[in-house]
Image (cartoon, rainbow, N blue to C red):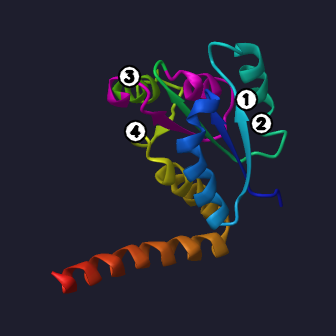
């Protein structure tokens, strides 16, 4: 069986402040993660080549974080059959430009998109995809969801 690997891509080094939270959440779930900087606009050939070889290189899910025009996730999705999770980054106009660029994909090129700067949700979505074939990971996710519920119940008891 292949190792569980997630590629975390960011359009710019400046995205690391947000992406770091994604990486940390993946590590919390013990998911092997590799991080790359690539740009749909500044390094299109490098980006497309990465996407075409991602599965061959052992990746099972790709998280693509980008701000502004945010075409990274779409370019990746156009060149692989792996699940691509788009993570829009708030760089300008409250991140709406990145959100719309990431979520509005043409028919046949889906990008699973989380909210603006929703770094932990991107990681959890990747884990949920990987958990389809991993009972241990599925159990960790169930425990996380149970903890979320317990936190809400405890908050209600305190008010």
Q: Please tell me which of labels 3 and 2 falls first in the chain.
A: 2
x and y, in percent, of residue 56 in the image: 84, 39
Task: Name the front one of labels 4 and 2.
Answer: 4
| Nearer to the camera, 114 or 112 | 114
The residue that disc 2 covers is 54
**From this viewpoint, which residue is outermost toward the bottom?**
157
**CB under 8 Å between callouts 2 and 1?**
yes
Q: Quadrant of the C terminus?
A: bottom left
Q: In this view, does 88 lie to the left or right of 21?
A: left
Tell me the residue at 53%/57% (across/down).
Answer: 124
Q: Is residue 132 left or right of residue 150?
A: right
Q: Please tell me which of labels 1 and 3 falls first in the chain.
A: 1
The residue that disc 1 covers is 51
Identify the secondary structure beneath mark 1: helix
Which dot marks residue 97? Answer: 3
Which dot marks residue 116? Answer: 4
Q: Quadrant of the N terminus?
A: bottom right
User: Residue 46: which quarter of the image?
Assistant: top right
x and y, in percent, of residue 125 in the image: 52, 53
Q: Answer few, some or many: residues within 10 Å of disc 2's Cα (few below 14, many 20 plus, some between 14 and 19).
A: many
Above or below for 77 versus 2: above
Q: Is residue 128 magenta?
A: no
Q: Answer few, some or many: residues within 10 Å of disc 4's Cα (few below 14, many 20 plus, some between 14 and 19).
A: many
x and y, in percent, of residue 27 in the image: 67, 61
Tell me the residue at 47%/53% (across/down).
Answer: 121
Q: Answer few, some or many: residues within 10 Å of disc 1's Cα (few below 14, many 20 plus, some between 14 and 19).
A: many
Identify the secondary structure beneath mark 4: loop
């Amino acid at each position: 069986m292949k190792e569980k690997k997630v590629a975390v891509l960011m359009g710019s080094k400046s995205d690391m402040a947000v992406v770091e939270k994604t990486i940390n959440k993946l590590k919390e779930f013990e998911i092997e993660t590799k991080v790359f900087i690539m740009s749909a606009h500044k390094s299109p050939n490098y980006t497309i080549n990465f996407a075409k070889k991602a599965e061959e290189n052992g990746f099972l899910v790709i998280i693509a974080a980008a701000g502004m025009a945010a075409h990274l996730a779409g370019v990746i999705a156009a060149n692989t059959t792996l699940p691509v999770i788009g993570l829009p980054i708030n760089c300008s106009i409250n991140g709406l430009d990145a959100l719309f660029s990431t979520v509005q994909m043409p028919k046949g090129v889906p990008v699973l998109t989380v909210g603006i700067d929703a770094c932990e949700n991107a990681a959890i979505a990747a884990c949920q995809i990987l958990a389809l074939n991993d009972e241990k990971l599925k159990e960790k996710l169930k425990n996380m969801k149970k903890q979320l519920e317990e936190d809400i119940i405890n908050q209600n008891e305190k008010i």
